Each structure stands twice: as structure tokens, then as C-alpha cells.
Amino acid sequence: MIKFASTEYNNPNKHYTTVKAQFDLEGNILPLSMTYNDEEYEIDRIVDIRPAASLKSGGAGIRYTCYVAGKKTYLFLEETRWFFELAE
């Protein structure tokens, strides 16, 4: 049997995070806050929600373009995990 060595790719742009989210009756998910460096940050506003791929970090899912602490941030829901990258 062939065994492949497991290689974990660490991308400095991909930051997995804990997210508090609200689910409505239609099944929509709206993130309310996220954690970074053990600090919780409230999401100021969400300006766009769409399926998208992350060209910087790799991966794909639902992309939330939002503002956190006044900075534009892309927050992704990739299957069952959240990650973010700063928009530049």
C-alpha cells in the first residue's frame, strides 16, 4: 500500500479563528465577533457576502467582507472552520 507523507502547509495570510455568529430562521449565518490573539473583536459591519476562493491564503467558502476595528477584513467560512485575512 502506498502511504503519502502528510505535509501541512502553513500560510502566514491564513489565520484560523473563533467566531460568534447569529443564525436566522432561513439558515443565514451572520458573524458578530471574532477572536485574534486571545482578544475578541466585534465586527463593525458586513458589506458583502458571497461564495469565493481565497487567492492569498488558499481555500474557499463563504467570504464575508467586513470591517473589524476599522480595517477591511475577509472572513471565510470554509466548511466548518473560520479563517480570516486582511484585505490590502
Image (cartoon, grey):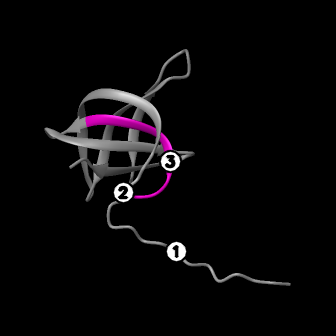
Q: Which residues are magenta?
A: 57-66
Amino acid identity at mark 3: Ala
Q: Is residue 20 left or right of residue 43?
A: right
- Residue at (26, 46) in percent of width and height: 40
Badge 3: residue crowd in 10 Å (few <14, some 14–19, many ≥20):
some
Residue that badge 3 annotates = 60
Disc 2: CA contacts within 10 A as few (<14), some (14-19) or many (>=20): few
Residue 73 placement (x, y as % from top left): 26, 43
Q: Which mark is residue 56?
A: 2
In this view, 19 is above or below 1: above
User: Counting residues from the N terminus, which is met first, the one under dot 1 or under dot 3?
Assistant: 1
Q: Earlier in the sequence, mark 2 or mark 1?
A: 1
Q: Position of residue 66 (x, y in %)?
A: 28, 34
| Real-space Cα separation, disc 2 to disc 1, in angstroms | 17 Å
**Which residue is drawn at the image coordinates 61% and 79% (left, top)?**
6
User: How far apart, in angstroms, are the residues tagged by discs 3 and 2?
Assistant: 11 Å
